Amino acid sequence: MHFLKLVFKNIFRHKLRSLLTLFGLVVAILAFGLLHTVVNAWYAGSDMASAQRLIARNAVSLVFPLPIYYRDRIRTVDGVTAVSVSNWFGGIYKDMAPANFFAQFGVDHENFFDLYPEFRTNPEELLAFKKDRRGAMVGRHLADQHGFKVGDVIPVKGTIYPGNWEFVVRGVYEPRDDTTITRQLYFHWDYLNEEIRRKYPRRAEQVGVFIIQIADGSRAAEVSRAVDREFANSLAETLTETEKAFQLSFIAQTETIVMAIRIVSFVVIVIIFAVVANTMAMTARERLAEYATLKALGFGPAFVGMLIVGESLAITLLGGALGILATFPAAAGFKAAMGSLFPVFRVAPETVAMQAACALAVGLLAGLLPSIRAARVRIVDGLRHIG
């Protein structure tokens, strides 16, 4: 008890120095947590992927479509239980502002939501969506962001598919949990195909990807190879992979950025370690005479060393706790500012654990060398020292 009281009294003997060190710790731990949350948000889409869903796309590039008749041939592959289609639309809602961007997909309205049980739908709304040629289903997050409700007409300006398009909201699907991304709009691929056939006949009867449901996730590689063999040497060969691998292929394009963010997050911790280590070194040097006095009164070297380490741990853990607490409102503000750029942006328990571990490591390492020096100082040398 007396030890802890002595530690906390020592922390604020130099109030300005201690407060500046605490401020630096809070900023460092906060920055570390935010940067790791950004990295986790980058991978949110792949984390939602199911082991029982495969994605088949054009083997050359995702830019090139596949003929719709491939769907019937894929259904015959052993292990496949269902096949749906998805086509990126890429339209503009209102303007080019990031806050107004959201993904739009033309899908097979008959079975698409059967393949995505993580999207919770109202049966009546889903039926109304299936019956309406211009019907659309919007995610809960998207609906909340823009105020969409059932019956609203959403005007979208086409980019890949020119023209002014209108989609009628027939339902709002809910997320299974807070890791499920629901910022997308899904509409009838048939509606898209009919308009394309009328305006651009050569681009009709083509889709972006096929979504394949398989009975056994452990057979994903086997079924993928079977699907690709089905279309080998055709004009449009396929590349079939797990949904997770498909999602990660997009992240791989920005892997350098993600790696840079990871490195910066640890550089921040290294910098604050240097700051705390310097603070503790200055503190120990100024108090050598006090430590010598403690030894002369009968306190052992271990007590003196633990006093310094305890002070270092106390200040880093206090700064770390404040930094962790500040991470949650900061993450909420960051998410609000970014709009739909990061659909899932939450501080994970693993991030909090890493923040706490970093604060603990900085405290231990920063106090280690000064404590060894203070523990080894001779009483005579310490009493002669002028801080």
Image (cartoon, grey):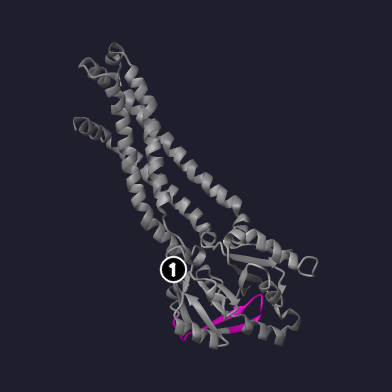
Residue 49 picture quarter: bottom right
Tell me: 178 left or right of 98.
left
Tell me: 309 left or right of 126.
left
- In the orientation shown, which residue stands out farthest toward the top? 380
- Whether the magenta-drawn stretch holds residue 70 is answered as no
Local secondary structure at mark 1: loop
Q: Nearer the viewer, residue 31 or 65?
A: 65
* x 56%, y 47%: residue: 260
- Whether the magenta-drawn stretch holds residue 154 is answered as yes
Residue 20 picture quarter: top left
Q: Nearer the viewer, residue 300 or 286?
A: 300
Instruction: Please name the residue that numbered disc 1 is placed on.
Output: 176
Placement of the C terminus among the 4 image quadrants: top left
- Up-down relation of residue 311 to residue 155 (above or below): above
Query: Percent from the top left, x then y, of residue 315?
Result: 31, 38
User: Does residue 337 appear in the picture of this structure?
Assistant: yes
Count of residue discs: 1
Q: Nearer the viewer, residue 168 or 154?
A: 168
Placement of the N terminus among the 4 image quadrants: top left
- Up-down relation of residue 269 to residue 311 (above or below): below
* x 37%, y 38%: residue: 360
Query: Percent from the top left, x then y, of residue 279?
Result: 36, 32
User: Does residue 153 appear in the picture of this structure?
Assistant: no
Q: Nearer the viewer, residue 25 or 176?
A: 176
* x 32%, y 28%: residue: 283
Query: Percent from the top left, x then y, of residue 141?
Result: 45, 71
Say what amino acid the circle numbered 1 marks. Answer: Arg
Chain part drawn in magenta: 149-165
Badge 1: how crowded within 10 Å, few (<14), some, or many (20+)? few
- Up-down relation of residue 327 to residue 83 (above or below): above
* x 71%, y 81%: residue: 204
